[in-house]
Amino acid sequence: MRIGDVLRRLDAYPRTLEDFSVRTVSGAAVTVISTSIIVMLIFLECLDYIRPKIHEDLFVDTTRNHKLRINLDITVHSLACSYVSLDAMDSSGDQHLRVDHDIFKHRLDLQGNPLKETEPIKEIVAVSPSNKNSTCGSCYGAELNSTQCCNTCEEVLDSYRQRKWNVQLEKIEQCKDKHKRNDIEAFKEGCRVQGHLEVNRMAGSFHIAPGNSFSIRQFHIHDFQFSEVKLDHTINHLSFGDKIDFAKTHPLDGLHTESDKDIKSEMYNYYLKIVPTLYARINHPPIHTNQFSVTRYKKDLSNSERGMPGIFFSYELSPLMVKYEEKKRSFGHFATNCCSIIGGVFTVAGIIAVFLNTSLEALQRKLEIGKMS
């Protein structure tokens, strides 16, 4: 017996002679439909193979050396920028954080449109008292080097001119006797506070409130002459790191808050729970950011309630970290799925074709018997 004959006996797919095969319209229809289904499913499988899968994991956060970046863009609709103060404080509330910041305030009209011919105002965020020699006056963030001192109002203004920043004279200690505000103008403009803070990774808070802020012993005080202040505001953006589209890194974006007409003054509180997040991407550097959930609460101060009108954000850091990791599927898995699609569809199509042919033949026989009778 020749080797060819032995191999023919192992053939699991014997060919049927052309004379013994019958081609039908129903079989052609099943073939076209099944082929279309196979092409569509394989195309979807290719897309799924190309796109990386995102796997989520949860573990204890050990990356405490990273700074916490607070990105904010908040519009206060009916309080002028010269009366808006932004302060950052630690979790105990009695000591300001040492923060790096880049905050600017943009003057707006009451309709929310930027005022023409005005430049952004550099905001001075309150920080903890310095231990430096008192003879070296602060330049309020505008110093060109660590040894520069600004002991007079003119030196502070010169530093701000070199930085090309607008200055708020009422917040400069050296200029406090050279500038007085007219409180009647407080509610004729709006203000947009925009920029970022970089603070240590610990629980804390920051707030936007009317009036100049200062500390006496362990008390944080805002100097403002009006007790009735409406702080209708819009949170255009608030995040604690880079933005990830599919994660909750910016759940407050676009939130507009407006007080009731009967309420004369309100205190807005936002309690934030921050969850550190790591996004490990394929062929890209990882992204360290933060997601957060929020609980909102507002307090009516019209009925002699204790509190200060303002927009307060208190945040806490979770000890756990969420990790999103992109992973590609193996080619073997992709090939196995494609083979399963082709084999499964053709098998089901074959069963349907046999059922249709058998049904049509039985119906045709019954019709022929009816004609003969």
Image: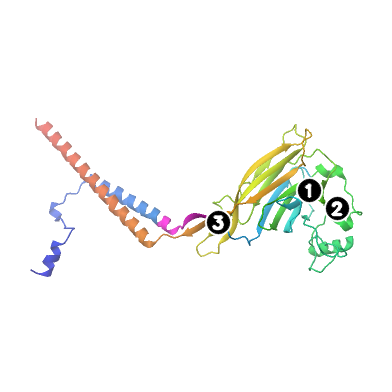
First of labels 3, 1 by sequence position: 3
| Residue 170, numbered label | 2
Task: Say whether marks 3 and 1 touch (CB < 8 Å).
Answer: no
Among numbered discs 1 and 2, the one appearing first in the sequence: 1
Q: Amino acid at mark 2?
A: Glu
Q: Nearer the viewer, residue 209 or 372?
A: 209
Q: Which residues are magenta?
A: 46-59
What residue would you read off at disc 1?
84
Of all residues, the one furthest to the top in this rendering is 373
Does the magenta run of residues contain 73? no
User: Residue 9 occupies which quadrant of the picture?
Assistant: bottom left
**Is disc 1 placed on a helix, strand or loop?**
strand
| Residue at the spot of label 3 | 60
Q: Position of residue 362 (x, y in %)?
A: 16, 38
Residue at left offset 69%, top offset 47%:
313
Q: Nearer the viewer, mark 3 or mark 1?
A: 3
- Residue 316's spot in the image, x, y percent? 64, 50
Side of 348 where 87 appears, left or right = right
| Res. 258 visible in picture | no
Residue 161 marker: none
State the separation of the CA atoms marked 1 and 2.
11 Å
Q: Residue at x 62, y 45 (%)?
A: 294
